[in-house]
Image (cartoon, helix red, strand yellow):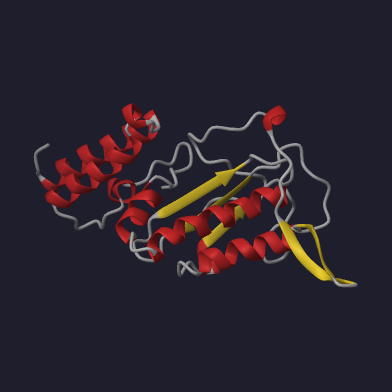
């Protein structure tokens, strides 16, 4: 993936939380025993990162197919290093490739004042979304994650089939179906992003023109 792990690459079109509105997170790591009590402490960068990778791993996402992007400098394995001072922007964004469609996905959180808390929140959000599938909502989960499609980097719009999340040999019917699915998630009238919707429309038009189909 071409997304950089450092510095933070915030997804295009995602709203930011004002610094004054950020909260103190409550995600913790379990520690050892102190007498009869099990101690806890605020979650570390390492523990939060492990938690996030574990949740994505349960979706069959390989480590090589994900990028965790923050304003923390990196370890040799490309993950954020613990023990650093908190950056002024504690946001965290995770990018990954869908293991079944190879479509780029992303999710970003900057609700909390510390990077580790935002990484842990990413893990918790993905865990909650996976619960949908466990309760028989596989199609609902697929549609939900469509809303987390990663936009191409500025100035590098993807091919029409990448934007529509279809194969290059897709039929006109498949192009139209993909357009309807993405429009349902990204149309501004439904709370979506206008830039993303314009990109989806462009991809549909290019695809149909190439395939000789009609809108």
The C terminus - image quarter: top left
Using residue 156 as the reference point, say whether residue 16 is left or right of it.
right
Q: Position of residue 97 (x, y in %)?
A: 44, 59
Residue at position x 52%, y 48% from top? 107
Q: Position of residue 141 (x, y in %)?
A: 37, 55
Residue 78 visible: no
The foreground one among 170 and 147 is 147
Residue 115 visible: yes
Residue at position x 66%, y 61% from top? 49
Is 193 rendered above or below residue 213?
A: above
The foreground one among 146 and 78 is 146
Q: Position of residue 152 (x, y in %)?
A: 44, 44
Q: Hey, which residue is sitting farthest right in the picture?
A: 35
Using residue 26 as the reference point, say whether residue 163 is left or right of it.
left
Using residue 52 as the reference point, say whether residue 20 is left or right of it.
right
Q: Hey, which residue is sitting farthest front in the picture?
A: 36
Using residue 1 as the reference point, say whether residue 24 is left or right of it.
right
Residue at position x 28%, y 39% from top? 184
The foreground one among 78 and 22 is 22
């Amino acid at each position: 993936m071409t997304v950089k792990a450092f510095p933070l690459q915030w997804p295009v079109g995602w709203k930011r939380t004002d610094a004054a509105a950020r909260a103190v997170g409550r995600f913790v790591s379990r520690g050892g025993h102190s007498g009869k009590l099990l101690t806890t402490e605020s979650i570390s960068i390492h523990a939060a990162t492990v938690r996030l990778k574990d949740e994505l791993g349960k979706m069959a996402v390989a480590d090589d197919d994900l990028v965790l992007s923050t304003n923390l400098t990196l370890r040799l394995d490309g993950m954020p290093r613990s023990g650093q001072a908190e950056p002024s922007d504690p946001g965290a964004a995770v990018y990954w490739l869908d293991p079944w469609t190879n479509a780029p996905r992303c999710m970003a959180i900057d609700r909390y004042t510390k990077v580790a808390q935002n990484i842990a929140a990413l893990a918790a959000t993905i865990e909650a979304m996976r619960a949908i599938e466990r309760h028989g909502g596989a199609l609902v989960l697929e549609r939900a994650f469509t809303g987390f499609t990663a936009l191409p980097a500025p100035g590098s719009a993807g091919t029409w089939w990448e934007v529509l999340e279809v194969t290059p040999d897709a039929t006109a019917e498949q192009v139209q179906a993909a357009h309807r699915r993405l429009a349902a998630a990204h149309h501004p009238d439904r709370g979506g992003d206008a830039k993303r919707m314009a990109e989806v429309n462009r991809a549909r038009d290019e695809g149909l023109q190439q395939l000789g189909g009609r809108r």
